[in-house]
Amino acid sequence: MSEFLIMVSFELNDKSLLNDWKALSQEIDEDIAQADGFISRDSGIDENAQVYCLVKWQSETHQQNFRQQLEARKSWPENMERFGAIANVSTMTSHNLEIF
């Protein structure tokens, strides 16, 4: 059985928001750790304030189920607004990979 990896990158709206991102990233780690099929999540930042996140799942179905659960939460719009205050969403790229 293969695993599923999502690679996301984006720029911070401002380099001074790094600590805000670290705090939000920690909250994401705590939330996603409880998800069915979750394997691991790592994030880092380069010298240009480009953030990279790698999230590994047991399958694409597990990832999609978790995303649907997130989007169904009443707090989803507020969470996305908070994320958008930190991340320059227009620079976001996402790649889905099946790991074999």
Image (tube, rainbow, N blue to C red):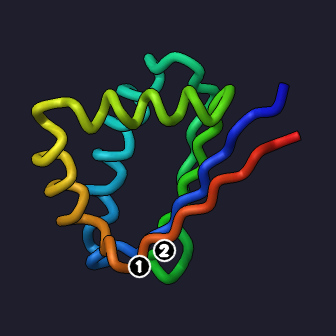
24 vs 74, left or right, is right
Rendered view: 39 above or below 54: above
Q: Residue at x 32, y 27 (%)?
A: 69
Which quadrant would residue 76 be assigned to in this image? top left
For disc 2, the neighbor class at 10 Å (few under 14, some 14 to 19, many from 20) is some
Residue at x 56% of width, y 27% of height:
62
Q: How busy is the neighbourhood of tag 1: few (under 14 within 10 Å), some, or many (20 plus)?
A: few
**Residue 24 location in percent, x, y?**
29, 46
In the image, residue 18 sits, relative to residue 78, either above or below, namely below
Amino acid type, callout 1: Thr
Instruction: From this view, report whether residue 18 is shown above or below residue 25.
Output: below
Foreground pick, 27 / 80: 80
Query: Which amino acid, mark 2?
Result: Gln
What is the quadrant of the N terminus in the image? top right
Above or below for 80 versus 94: above
Residue at numbered disc 1:
91
Q: From the viewer's perspective, tell me whether residue 91 is left or right of residue 73.
A: right
Is the Cβ of the residue at disc 2 closer than 8 Å to that at disc 1?
A: yes
Q: Quadrant of the C terminus?
A: top right
Quickly name the residue at label 2: 50
